[in-house]
Image (tube, rainbow, N blue to C red):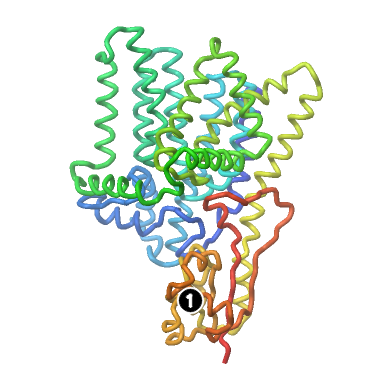
Amino acid sequence: MSRRTSALLVVIFLSLGLNVTAAWWGLPSRFAWAPDELQPPIILKGIDEKFSGDWHQPAYPPFHYYVLAASYLPVIGLDLVEVDSVSGRTWFYVLGRVISLAMGVGILILIYRLGEELFAPPAALFATIVAALSATFVYYAKFANLDVPAAFWVLWSLYFFVRHLKTERRRDRNLFAVMAVVAMCTKDQAYAFYIVPVGLYLVRHWRRSGPFFDRGLLTTAAIATFLFLVIHNAVFNFWGFIHHFEEILWARGHYSSFESGPSQQISLALQSLRHLRFSLGWPFTIAAAGGVWLSWRHRRDRPEALWVLAAGVSYYLFFIAPVRSTWLRYIVPLSLIFALFAGHCLAALWTGRHRWYRAGVAAVLLYSSLYAASVDVLLLDDSRYTVEQWLSERESDAVIGFIGPEYYLPRLDAFPARRLRPTSSVIERSRPSYLVINPEYAARFPPESREGEFFGSLAAGRAGYGLAFRHQSAPSPMLLDFDGILGNMAKINPVIEVYQRAD
């Protein structure tokens, strides 16, 4: 085994340790704590309906649902669990998270291979380290969200795209098309990565070869189109296929976080940069900028790096900017692309003439390791664990009412608990011994609404309940700063309030 392979395996092993740590966050439970995690009942319904008829999900295309379904089928076929029980749901969450962990390993291998193709082995190794220590990667690689699977397929498609640019082999171009389609069928927004690079590629092909489309390009397009329709099950699930895209187009106009206009587009760009900085941390973000500059300087010797950069720019221009929305999870694939450039910069410093460059790189790696580990520290010390312990020490037959989605609250499967609407009339009829709320969720309701009036009276002590326990953990050391961050990671370790009935 070569030294390069050994070094890569060490990075992968250490990364897997980071990613596996706290992968049990919120489990066992019928409702895990990771927002936007694919929910087992949806996959089970797809299995029952054979993903046909009018089966569809408004937010996501079907490919990863098929992957999860394939992992569920042995458990269901062997009747290992009762599917809707706490243990059954936990099994299915674990299967989804294991798949994400495996794809996280695949991402690191792809980053390394791309780094070799674009730069050199030292840059490839540093790029892999940067990707492994990205805060968003450490978080999403351990949960059954779609962000790591989508990034996995995007990176695989870019790998074959770079290979084709260097060798002109049709096989690599066809494999690029296949992986790009799978990426788009995992998460629709992946389409945006390909508009600029494919457009530039067609122009280059036309200038070199004459016809804009030749037989080889038409074959690639036919493969992509056929695969897209097959994955979407467009024949047996025609109306599900249509309804998915109808709802995607509807959502585009209803979930924008920024208004239209130049000033708002500037704010959107700054927010996206803030998210990229949060994902990579300041040192790696600066290194990524340095790597982009180095790539531009050597664009004649290594032009493929700018093609990969064009994919990231394309994603911003044709997805984030038009939908006028940016969330932290949108940055996951971008942070992995920029990890390549950060690795290029760090390798250049490491192999530089001055010894203190190496000391600086070592300091950056140490800080970034602690930065990435902060994700796990926060997950392990989530406030809801302490609230669960506090509730377990109260009287065992006390009825606990909870308000809001389960993934914002402590696990209450082991208690006599019931979900309640946040209105005074409902609470007066139910009269639970305790009320558990997440104040951040409560703040979503306007003060003049029925719900807002109830939460206001509850906080003021006029609802027949008094605040008995309020908790948010303060783990140390903690290098993550969620100020100004829009995303699910900011929902780790929430403030939880428990109110006790005043008898």
In the image, 119 versus 396, the foreground residue is 119
Instruction: Identify which amino acid the numbered label 1 is placed on.
Output: Glu
> Where 286 sits versus 253, above or below?
above
Q: Residue at x 35, y 8 (%)?
A: 207
Image quadrant where residue 470 sits: bottom right
Residue 268 in the image, given as x and y percentages of width and height: 50, 41
Q: Secondary structure at mark 1?
A: helix
Residue 397 appears in the picture as rendered: no
Quadrant location of the C terminus?
bottom right
Dot 1: few (<14), some (14–19), or many (≥20) neighbours within 10 Å?
A: some
Q: How many marks?
A: 1
Residue 45 appears in the picture as rendered: yes
Residue 444 in the image, given as x and y percentages of width and height: 48, 64
> Where 246 sits versus 218, above or below?
below
In the image, 430 versus 119, the foreground residue is 430
In the image, 36 versus 490, the foreground residue is 490
Image quadrant where residue 245 sits: top left
Q: Residue at x 57, y 49 (%)?
A: 485
Classify residue 148 as left or right of residue 339. Answer: left
Residue 66 in the image, given as x and y percentages of width and height: 34, 46
Classify residue 23 as left or right of residue 165. Answer: right
Name the residue carrying label 1.
453
Image quadrant where residue 382 sits: bottom right
> Where 413 sits versus 160, above or below?
below
Q: Residue at x 41, y 17 (%)?
A: 164
